Image: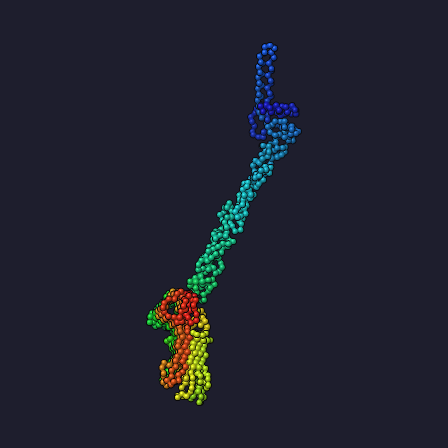
Amino acid sequence: MNRIRFSFVALAACAAFAACSGATGPQGTPGATGPSGIAGAPGATGATGTAGERGTNGATGATGAVGATGAVGATGAVGATGPAAYCTTDADCARLDAGTALGCCLGQCAPLNTNDNCGACGQACAPANASGDCSTGSCQVATCNPGFAHCDADAGVGCETRTDTDLANCGACGKSCAPVNATGACLDGVCQIASCNAGFASCEGDPSKGCATSLSTTSDCGACGSVCAPPNATGSCAAGSCAIASCAAGFGDCNANPADGCEANLQTDAKNCGACGNACTAGAACVAGGCVPFVSTGAEGDFFPLANTTLTGGVHNFRSIFIPAGVTVTIDSNTNQGVLDLRAQGDVTVQGTIDMSGGPGGIGPAGDVSWIGASGGDTANPASGGKTPTPGCGCGCNNPTEWGGKGGAGSPGSNAPGPQLCGVSLGLGGNMGGGQAGFPGGGGGGGFAGGGGGACVCPALSGNCPDYSPGQYGLSAGGAGGGAFSGAGGVLSGANHWQVGGGAGGQGGGAPYDGSNGGGIQFNGGWADANDAMGAGGGGGSIGQDTAQDLAVASTFRPGSAGGGGGGDEGRGGGGGGGALRIASATRIAIYGKLLANGGAGGGTPSPVPDCCQGGGGGGGSGGVIYLSAPSVVNFGMVSAVGGAGGSSVSARGAPGGAGGNGGLGRIRISAGGVTGQGSFNPALPQKLDGSANGSGLAYIEPWPK
């Protein structure tokens, strides 16, 4: 029917415009799909049948038969698109029923649903970045060009969005490229990471996860996989830098370099012992976080003497030390500096004796006049006492080189002034031992604070006193002791110099470390024997004021000092100072016997001696020092460093000389984790053994290994 109607319209159009399309031909085969052509004109309407004749009035005539309906003309085949109908306005085309909107485009009716005439003549359907589709009469996007998309509702703008580079539409509309902790980049529609934010990284290598890894963790510190685990420490990562949060127990970061962690072992590093920068002294070792300056190398093996033994002075390195009961260890006087330092890697056990006491001063001669005084005892050598002159032979059998005692460190005592006797000056200094006397005053004791020698008085006719004149009495002062804190020599005072003074004791800063002054005498003259001579006592030795202020023995590990010699003919020798004994063990010190560093006793006269001129008694030597260092100290024996007693002077004629002064107290220093046992210490231990009750006159104790 539509085809018939279209043909009719087309015929009418031919008549109206004297122009028409080609005649409708026979129905042909459909052409290939292309742009729709104008529909063929509708077939002609069939002729109306002739009406029947009206009958005559009367009987109603029969109804005439209805004429047959004309056959519908066959639909004309769609012919090839021919020239459009000519027109001048769109209204001319509107009369055409073409099944779609037509417009008058350049004088011809044309459909308005093509990409060239989309909705209006000349209005192209060409959306941006796309191919258009105007089949509905309005321009729509058919397909977008690669890399573009139509993301808004306005078809007129086409595929306005670049999906190959747009971060908000990367690869598809609304698909944002915003990786975590990063700046994104859309490359060919694929979201990538342009750069990570500071402090983050893409350690997984997956752009979809962004820069998810913080570079401020100990597992990824500053870079992916960079572990912050400094040695001997707990690490921390801040701003991508590995730092040390804390050190493991016993370690320290002493070079401020996180790369090597807490590199210093504070338990064993001698440069950083217990704390960074706490350096032990040269030769010391760091043990359990404390400086232990007395570590043994073990080079001398085990020390296990089976008989009395004499060691050279100085340091000895043993593996272990065991001194059996009945065995005594002393120091060799030929190498004696007054110091014996015994070190062991293992236990030290003393069942016998280690004796570093000073030697006793020489005593007065028995029998006739010898003119020669006794010498002083050695320091730290109890077996080397002062020489006692042989009576009655003067210089003939008495060696003047033996008149002064031997000794170690410290200064020799001063000689008393006097004439020559036996080729040497009378009143020789006693070095570390004490004074040799003679007719003049006694010599001073040697050491750091030696006692002074006693003065003397010589009767007329002797011819041996320094200020002798016929009919007068000769008088002589004593020599001063050795050292910065020595005692002065005895002096003379009173009418006619009849007050004969004893030597002053060495100075220890007060009791109990001062040496006692030697005893003076009162000379009244008129002795039966015009050749008699009398002397005052020598002063006791001292450890010295500086040493008494160093009870911890931090800088004054040294022996004591000798007592001064007695004045007068046959004056007695002073006692030697006690030595310096140190015993150090890495394990334990056990004492069942004796450790001694006592001062030597001053020489004296043991009993009344007839026919003897009376010199003064020698001063006692001071105590030395005993230093024990070990994790454990056990004492069931004796540890002693006391001063020696001054020598007495006894006369059968009722005119004695002065007594010698006592030596001052020595020191005991203990560094131990614990001190046990019922043995004795002199000086005594403080009431508390934790170092809180240390004081003058007591042993000094601190926890090991201090």
Count all numbered tags in the image, as a single digit: 0
Q: Hey, which quadrant is residue 477 in on the image?
A: bottom left
Residue 641: horizontal and vertical position, in percent?
A: 40, 72
Where is 588 relative to 176, above or below? below
Q: Hey, which quadrant is residue 64 in on the image?
A: top right
Q: Nearer the viewer, residue 602 or 483?
A: 602
Q: Is residue 563 visible?
A: no
Q: Hey, which quadrant is residue 118 in on the image?
A: top right
Q: Residue at x 38, y 85 (%)?
A: 654
Q: Residue at x 57, y 21 (%)?
A: 72
Q: Is residue 545 visible?
A: yes
Q: Is residue 482 left or right of residue 86?
A: left
Q: Nearer the viewer, residue 295 or 592?
A: 592
Where is 533 relative to 180, above or below? below
Q: Residue at x 56, y 28 (%)?
A: 31
Q: Residue at x 43, y 70 (%)?
A: 695
